[in-house]
Amino acid sequence: MKSLNAYILGFVLSIGFTLVAFWTVGAGFGAGMGVGILVVLAVLQLLVQLILFLHLGREPKPRWNLIAFFFALFVVVVIVGGSLWIMNNVNHEQLGSYNVFEKENIPAPNHEDHSN
Amino acid sequence: MINPHTKDKNTFGFWVYIMSDCVLFAGLFATYFVLQGATFGASTIDEIVDLPFVLVETILLLTSSFTIGLALLAARSGKKNLTLSFLLLTFLLGLGFLGMEVFEFMKLVGEGSGPGRSAFLSAFFTLLGTHGLHVFLGLIWMLAVMAHVMLRGVGEKTLSKIMCLSLFWHFLDIIWIFIFTLVYLMGALAF
């Protein structure tokens, strides 16, 4: 029974990826390396779920499910990526200005000076 | 292997709903990432995360995603009792997950790290709470489907219901994987 095998394989892989991800956090990789490994594992996990559990791409043509999925993926990337990009920029322009003062040893503006 | 999810228009319509729900979660994830550092002197993510606890939650949900797949397979081969057993198992695993999540929330609120404490905690509770609410509604739906199977057996109509439910449940599993990785694991790692 082929479908059953797909579900069993999906289950074993998803538990495996989860345990590896859990181990990664405690294994003492640097922040950059650790985040990279976690992202790769999350994407692998997503693919396992989509292909082995949701059978995405296995439907006969035209593949409307797949098309709807890619459109949703596009919107998700725009929302998350766009929000992070814009908000980081805003943080850099406003809140980050004090860090600039610290880096160049310029005294930060004194807010207690305001008359009134 | 043929795709069991595309036999009728119902499941496609439901798939489109799930995709739009993905967009809802994208908004909540984006909000969370933007506000992650806005802790206002209250707990940060690495202070509130209890990794072994979350690992158990994750394994419960992953297992329930597997058992609902088995329930769908059992339903497709017309085995009523097996279908009911796997649905019940999925229900119990889901209930265990939800119980753990509620326990975690109560603990945080009890420690003074409720959703009103900081922008980060608001975003945290909104993201996880929305996922938990989906799981809760899924559990109620699962009870309804189980009642349907019990009364009418596994016919064409029941099969369509179980397909939609299994799509929904796998989707919640995927959302949780991202919460587990991006909120909990990265939160424990990045600080």
Image: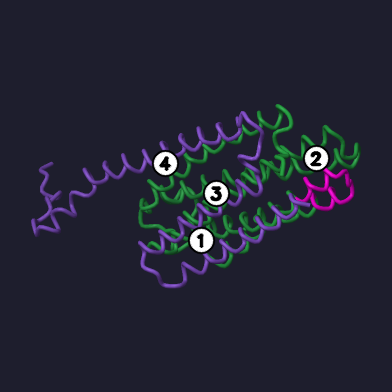
**Chain of the residue that carries numbered disc 3 in the rendered image:** B
Give the residue pinned by disc 3. B128
Give the residue pinned by disc 1. B111
Q: CA distance from mark 2 to mark 3?
A: 25 Å
Give the residue pinned by disc 4. A80
Let me know if residue B74 is in the magenta part: yes
- Foreground label between 3 and 1: 3
Give the residue pinned by disc 2. B145
**Chain of the residue that carries numbered disc 4 in the rendered image:** A
- In the rendered structure, are the residues bearing label 3 and label 1 in contact, judged by CB atoms less than 8 Å apart? no
Residue A99, how many percent across, how many down? 19, 55
Q: Is residue B72 left or right of residue A58?
A: right
Identify the secondary structure beneath mark 2: helix
Q: CA distance from mark 3 to mark 1?
A: 18 Å
Q: Which amino acid, mark 3?
A: Leu
Q: Residues within 10 Å of mark 2 (few under 14, many from 20)?
A: some
Which comes before the other along the chain, label 2 or label 3?
A: 3
**Which of the chains is purple?**
A
The quadrant in which the C terminus of chain B is found is bottom left
Residue A79, how many percent across, how many down? 42, 37
- In the rendered structure, are the residues bearing label 2 and label 4 in contact, judged by CB atoms less than 8 Å apart? no
Q: Residues within 10 Å of mark 4 (few under 14, many from 20)?
A: many
> Which contiguous range is marked in magenta?
B70-87
- Foreground label between 1 and 4: 4
Identify the secondary structure beneath mark 3: helix
- In the rendered structure, are the residues bearing label 1 and label 4 in contact, judged by CB atoms less than 8 Å apart? no
Residue B66, how many percent across, how many down? 70, 54
Badge 1 and badge 4 both on one subunit: no
Residue at image coords 76%, 43%: B142
